[in-house]
Image (cartoon, grey):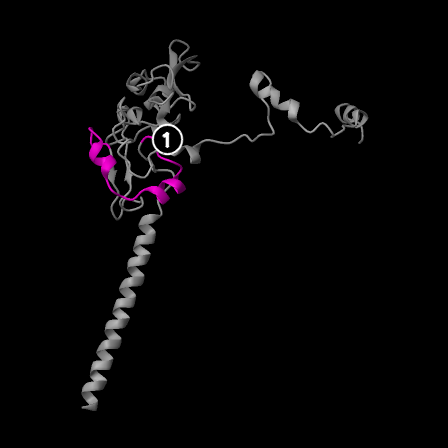
Amino acid sequence: MADMEFSSRREALKFGAKAAILALSGGFIWSLSAKASPLMLLRPPGAKNEKQFLESCIRCGLCVEACPFDTLKLASLGDGVSIGTPYFEPRKIPCYMCENIPCVPVCPTGALDVNLVSTNDKLDINKAKMGVAVVDMKNCVAYWGIQCDACYRACPLLDKALYLEYRRNERTQKHAFLLPVVDSDICTGCGVCERACITEKAAITVLNRDVVLGKVGDNYVKGWIKEDERRIDDADSKIKLDIKKATNYLNGGEL
């Protein structure tokens, strides 16, 4: 009888240990899948910033169902994106910028915010900021001098989000470079340019805006823009500069 009780207790302890290990490993796997690479995250139009998006998204998949081009998909284990959340890979299927943006209004929680893709209460896909295209000048054949405008021709916002800069080719002294240049203020991050790129691995890639773009800060003023220059009026005028010290510095003298 004692042997049976001991055996049962031992089996129970084994089961408990296995269950604990499975729970821990499951949690570890989930944590790995939940940590997405910020460089590769491309959310649907109207997505809030990543933190707010993850807090709001309930993984319902309605946006994926509403997408007419099968662009969006729900992340699964190993995708490097939080499981069950919508994202897209432009090299495979980009966002084709539907005017009625069907994926956004169906979102039940506002994780995809209609206000972020609207102008005067009307849906405006051009307001989308899914990412921003970045040109790899070392591997873009246009920067080699080979005539290619595949990404430029594919851009839905031709000559706005993506335009060509003409530059003299000093190497050949004959032909001009036709260089693709991205305007990050206008680029929606749809990824159509990346899909159209002719190189084996795209030389123009859409990446997360928060990772790629810099932030100047409020201490710099664009003096050539009247609205920005007005900020000087509210600046702290109590700071007094020593003109003599400044003059000595400029003339190479001691402070």
In the rendered image, the vertical position of residue 207 relative to residue 84, given as above or below: above
- Residue 61 drawn in magenta: yes
Q: Residue furthest front?
A: 121
Whole-percent x and y of residue 118? 36, 24
What's drawn in magenta, residue-wise? 45-71
Image coordinates of residue 175 in percent, x first then y, are 37, 10
Tell me, yes or no, if residue 139 can be seen here: no
- Reading the image, the residue beneath label 1 is 131
Residue 198 position in % (x across, y down): 27, 24
Which percent across, then down, holds residue 35?
A: 36, 47
Assign the C terminus to one quadrant of the image: top right
Residue 23 in view here: yes
**Image-quadrant location for residue 153:** top left
State how many labels appear: 1
Q: Amino acid type of disc 1?
A: Gly
Q: Quadrant of the N terminus?
A: bottom left
- Which residue is drawn at the image coordinates 30% and 19% (left, top)? 156
Which image quadrant is residue 106 in?
A: top left
**In screen coordinates, is 182 left or right of 228?**
left
- The one nearer the camera, 220 or 235, is 235
156 over 32 or under it: above or below: above
Q: Quadrant of residue 25?
A: bottom left
| Residue at the extreme bottom of the image, as rendered | 1
* Disc 1 secondary structure class: loop
> Relative to residue 59, is residue 134 drawn left or right?
right
Q: Nearer the viewer, residue 25 or 226?
A: 226
Mark 1 neighbour density, 10 Å: few (under 14) some (14–19) many (20 or more): many
Residue 28 drawn in magenta: no
